[in-house]
Image (cartoon, rainbow, N blue to C red):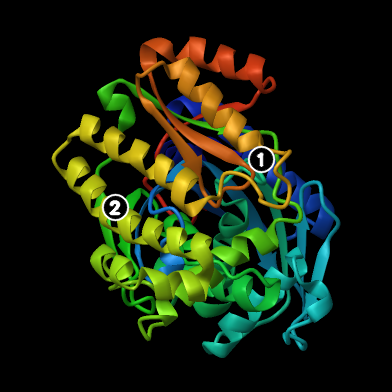
Amino acid sequence: MDGAWDAKLCALYGEDRLSKQRQRYAGLVGTFAAQFGGETAPMLFSAPGRTELAGNHTDHQNGRVLAGAVTLDAVAAASFSAAPVITLCSQGYAPVRIPICDLSVHPEEKNTTAALLRGIAAAFQKRGAKLRGADICLTSDVLAGSGLSSSACFEVLTGCVFNELFFEGACSPQEIARIGQYAENVYFGKPSGLMDQMACAVGGCVAIDFENPATPQVEPMAFSPERHGYALVIVDSGADHADLTEEYAAIPQEMALAASVFGQTVLRGIGADSLFAQADEVRRTAGDRGFLRALHFVKENERVLDMAKALKQDDMAGFLRQAAASGHSSWELLQNIYSSRFPQHQAVAVALASAACALNGEGTVRVHGGGFAGTIQAYVPAAKLSAFVSFMEHTLFPGCCHILGIRQAGCLRVL
């Protein structure tokens, strides 16, 4: 790579990370040439991971969320190919090949990269994109299974590539996010909401209101924990998401059962007073856990407004109080800290309890993302950061802490 690329890489990653990112992109281009030949210089793309700031399991109920793109991303090199096949080579994985003549759902591909790639291609074809053969080489530093949405990041990055190659950039970032959700829901088989893809696609810190999920309202927010003397730390609990699809799916299913008592398919628009007025019926229909999860949604959906207001008023103390309340609600009402099927495995609970002890009343900590496994989110006073990391790595394992920033750019063609 020559110096002409430096300005764009600096704008995206900062001067302090220029050398590392220059090497990273040069390595990606070299890998692409080794895999597919070097006759044509590939286009280069990036999409960030995301962190959920508030709105734990609210998006699939047409609720509100706060989320931010993070300073970890997936990058891709891509170019056209002569064969009518989309080929994806992802670092550390076997190549995936999708013939563009067959973009139907393949049930045997559920929960695979091939399913996502095929679903994204199908979504672009339905929108009128002229598909042709393409070669894609991808690498990512978004931690898999971390709650930083490595899957949504992949979907959005692939959508960004297809948008440029096949659709002349006609799709907005919001539409690319919806394409990713479609592929995940219909082809991959996971009933996810839209928050992850939207945050990765749009970038920065955003408040998103999914009251109308077809056209969610996205409001940029200013968010800089560092300016208030805090580090945003994502802590890996050491547990993964294997065999937890049923646990994740049960949350929207039980919330939908609770909503059905009110003649609705989702909980948006149902208040706490109404929920308690119909408590007996909700408990009969959705079960006690379903009632508690519905109550979590009602409270969390309002809490997002309070946290957005705190950010607008530059009230970090108020923001942290509400973040702590969000964490308590997820543990006590939503109950997504550990699997009820495997109560002997409570890695996220151990991580939360350990972080609370390490913070000792300063900052705050909450579950991060979908829960059950994966990561927690901590706001750590800068003066305690080194001690916090040491404590957590001693309690859990070396390398479990990841200090992140908020990235302003969403998915984009870099070069």
Where residue 311 sits in the image (x, y, percent)?
A: 21, 42
Q: Mark 2, mark 1: which one is toward the viewer?
A: 2
Q: Residue at x 45, y 51 (%)?
A: 333
Amino acid carrying label 1: it is Ala
Q: Which mark is residue 304?
A: 2
Image quadrant assignment for residue 162? bottom right
User: Does the rendering let one see residue 178?
Assistant: no
Amino acid carrying label 2: it is Val
Residue at mark 1: 26
**Crowdedness near tag 1: few (<14), some (14–19) or many (≥20) residues, C-alpha within 10 Å:** some
Q: Residue at x 57, y 13 (%)?
A: 391
Where residue 3 sits in the image (x, y, percent)?
A: 52, 35
Counting residues from the start of the chain, the first of labels 2 and 1 encountered is: 1
Q: Residue at x 46, y 59 (%)?
A: 293
Give whichever of 280, 216 is nearer the camera: 280
Quadrant that contains the N terminus: top right
Give whichever of 282, 349 is nearer the camera: 282
Give whichever of 340, 22 is nearer the camera: 340
Where residue 186 sits in the image (x, y, percent)?
A: 64, 79
Image quadrant assignment for residue 134? bottom right
